Image (cartoon, rainbow, N blue to C red):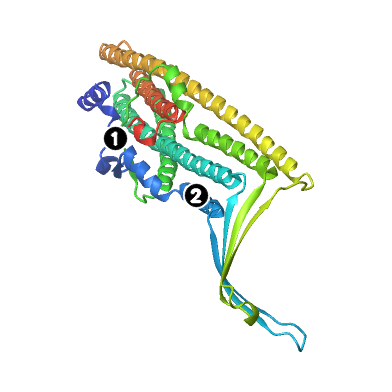
Amino acid sequence: MNAALRILLLSVLAGRAFAAPAPSAAGDAPSGRPISLAEAYERALGVSDDLAGRFETVSEAWARVSELWSAVQPRLSLKASEFVQDSSSSRDKPEVKFTLRQPLFTGLREFLALRAAKAKGRASELELLRAKDLLYLDVAGAYLDLHGLHRELDIRFALVGITKERIRELKERERIGRSRKSEVLAAESQLAGLVADLAEAKRRELGAQEVLRFLTGIPERLVPESMEPQPAAGVEGYIASSRSRGDVAARREDLAAAKDATESFRRGRWPFAALDGNYYLKRSESQKDVKWDLTVSAELPLYQGLQTSAQVRQGQARERAAEAALSAALRRAETEVRTAHADLLAGMEVVAALERAVSLAEANAKAQTEDYRLGLVTNLDVLGALNALQQARLRLESSRVDVVFSRFRLAAASGLAAGAYPR
């Protein structure tokens, strides 16, 4: 075995083959602007069109609260009129006045409607909060995809480099008659497949770059930071947390709003009273001495064509729909927590098993190298052992990324605020 190959093999076995070749040497190693997950999320918050739309929905909901609040406040207006009659004996009757109307009692229907609108406003805010959590999950997924592809590219670059070095040595040995032509062809065939795999990984890396750039609005090539798997606590704590996550809490507010709306409809049968007042700035000659007047009125609805009953039935139907939506949200949240937690635990087991597989593959590569030195195995056997080691490392890195993402899924399913997510 020549000195260059020994150096390369020792580098592989020591794990340094994970490092990408320098850009000057390979020209294709992942490079670009370093970015943390926290920064990626902050950038995504600023450019998300979905969040912008949801924010306007929240603004509209609270504007509706202000609109309903005006229903219980006094109304003041300035009115002017001119009464003209087709009669030679009658006079025009000009009138300019301030009018005031103040509802005195309406069965508190306006206050119930106002309370329902506030519940809807809170529900919109909770939906916005949930949308932020899901955006964090989307950013984390894109971030981890790109990170995983960069690790994959590092390994595939190293694997191609190892194979090229082995082919160079095989050709040298073939020239002096110590290797067969078939060995060289087999190694070159393997190299062609590895180059194709590398090209496919580059293509997927470009796609992952575009996804993360779209989410963050950063036009540069991005290089995520390394992230390691984290263990999780018992599932019951996450389930308890999920019962108050944004979308579940929003459904509770929807149910409260539906109940207030139904009660407001019921009180359509109640009496109502109002105070009306006028202050006159200008009146006809016959009434010019009367400067103001007040009217207190009351009304008891007796028959409205079953309108109130129909409205109550509609409200009750909305209550049942809101209850069903709340139940579905609770069950969905628990299912998502249990699934993410199970995936995380299983993924941790897979990572532990693959770490052992990598350790054994390293030992096998060392043994194959020693046997090659003693002439007990062929050059292709050594190459196969090194390839097996790199393939095991590829699986390990992929599994680590899956485990980290499962941790983020668990955080999102349990309704943790974005600031509390694992970094």
Residue 417 appears left or right of 116: left
* 208 over 336 or under it: above or below: below
User: From this viewpoint, is residue 341 visible?
Assistant: yes
Distance (Cα) linking label 1 and label 2: 53 Å
Q: Position of residue 356 (x, y in %)?
A: 34, 13
- Asked where in the image residue 401 lies, by quadrant, the reply is top left
Helix or strand or loop: what does disc 1 sit on? loop
Q: What residue type is labelled 1?
A: Ala
User: From this viewpoint, is residue 30 visible?
Assistant: no
Helix or strand or loop: what does disc 2 sit on? helix
Q: Where is residue 67 in the image (x, y as percent from the top left)?
A: 54, 54
Query: Label 1 belongs to which residue?
Result: 20
Query: Label 2 belongs to which residue?
Result: 62
* 201 over 278 or under it: above or below: above
- In the picture, the disc for residue 130 is none
Q: Which of 239 and 337 is in front in this view?
A: 239
Q: Where is residue 227 in the image (x, y as percent from the top left)?
A: 32, 30
Q: In which quarter of the image is the N terminus?
A: top left
* 244 over 366 or under it: above or below: below
Q: Residues within 10 Å of mark 1 (few under 14, many from 20)?
A: many
